[in-house]
Amino acid sequence: MTENIKSVDICCGLNWGDEAKGKIIAHLSKHGKYDFVCRWSGGNNAGHTIYINGKKYKTHLIPCGIFFNIPCIIGPDCVINYESFEKELLYLKDNGFNIDLIKISPKTHVITKEHIEDDKNNYKSQGTTSKGIAPCYRDKYARTGLQVKNVVKFQKYLWDEKLYGNILCEGAQGFWLDITQGNYPYVTSSTTLPYGACSLGFSPKLINNIYGATKIYDTRSGTDTEFPETLFEDNELNMIAEAGNEIGTTTGRRRKVNWLNMNKLIKSINISGTTHVIISKIDIFEKLNLYKLINNNNIVIFNSTVELKDYLNNKIYKNCNWVKNIIYSNNVEYVEGLI
Ligand code: IMP
Ligand code: MG
């Protein structure tokens, strides 16, 4: 029933996850008049932190639209574990949110106990979140998996597969964790790029705004040869990790920090089709009076936020044709100037 869809907006991560997508999605949900907020990929490996009236909330699988009373869909290319889902439902219910708005695609694949055990035992070297993601997608693609529609406990949550009006799609993870684009095998097992959202059942022609999220520095949770252990020895980067509280929402691990890689950012903006770039955590640089990024493998140093922003604006507008707007955000609760 895609003829009833007016427009689709997407929020995606441009780096390795943890780019403050939760905050952006919350802001859009609050102001954007969306009829649905949908997740299109991954499972409870994600961790979205959002603040409402100063109170902090965390979700892993359920879209942030739930905080603003908007119907929420867990899409067919997501994966779901019943016990974790139930836990999240209870948490939301206890906090006064209407969990009747949450629906799951009948085609969503089920993460079983065996998947979680397999992940814990066999994927340590990759530093996964141990939520059973890779084994579940493996079974999906081997065509031996289990879908939500065939599990009794899930029946009351089944989505009728209809969408209408204005849709917001909530990305999980980030561009460089995409199963195809990322540094394989140090990736997740799903499509983190906006085109993946079409798995919800609409044409790419309906996509309007693509909100690409990045921080002013790069972080990596989990193992990756592009983020060597030596990064932990750099004083300035450690100061940023401390000031930015770079601890994983899902895993509680300290994230590796590096200066923003400009070349990678330009590529992820362009391939994702990002129209609005949201750059968060500038305040961390200001607090430490440190302003650096990496361009063509060289560290570029600036003296102030103004210099840094000028450089970023020039680079992005010059190299990224789709970008209409670059927004810098310091606030954990809202994104001034977004809508
Ligand atoms: P998996 O998705 O649990 O299989 O983990 C694969 C890789 O992606 C690991 O390096 C994880 O740390 C990373 N990862 C998965 N989800 C997220 C996320 O939401 N934020 C940051 N990193 C993530
Ligand atoms: Mg996160």
Image: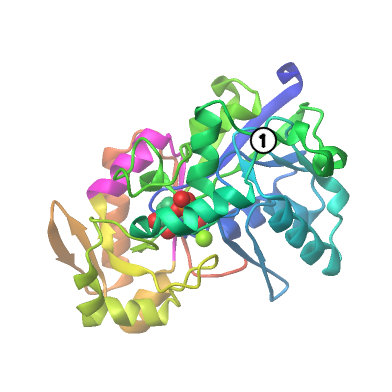
On the rendering, which quadrant does ligand 1 occupy?
bottom left
Residue 30 makes an appearance in the image: no
The residue at the point 29 percent across, 58 percent down is 310
- Viewer can see residue 139: yes
Q: Is residue 269 magenta?
A: yes
What amino acid type is highlighted by mark number 1? Thr
Placement of 252 over or under 185, stated as above or below:
below
Q: Residue at x 40, y 69 (%)?
A: 282
Residue 163, horizontal then vertical, whole percent: 75, 28
* SS assignment at label 1: loop
Q: Residue 92: x percent and y percent?
A: 79, 63
Q: Residue at x 66, y 56 (%)?
A: 26
Q: Position of residue 208 (x, y in %)?
A: 57, 31
Give the residue displayed 16% in from the left and 63% down from the top. Answer: 300
Q: Nearer the viewer, residue 213 or 320?
A: 213
Q: Is residue 141 magenta?
A: no
Q: Quick one: 231 or 333, which is closer to the camera?
A: 231
Up/down of 69 relative to 142, above or below: below
* Image side of residue 326 versus residue 140, left or right: left
- Which residue bears the numbered disc 1? 108
Label 1 residue near ligand 1, CB within 8 Å: no
Using the image as rendered, state which of residue 215 and residue 196 is in the foreground: 196
Question: Total marks drawn?
Answer: 1
Q: Which residues are magenta?
A: 263-280
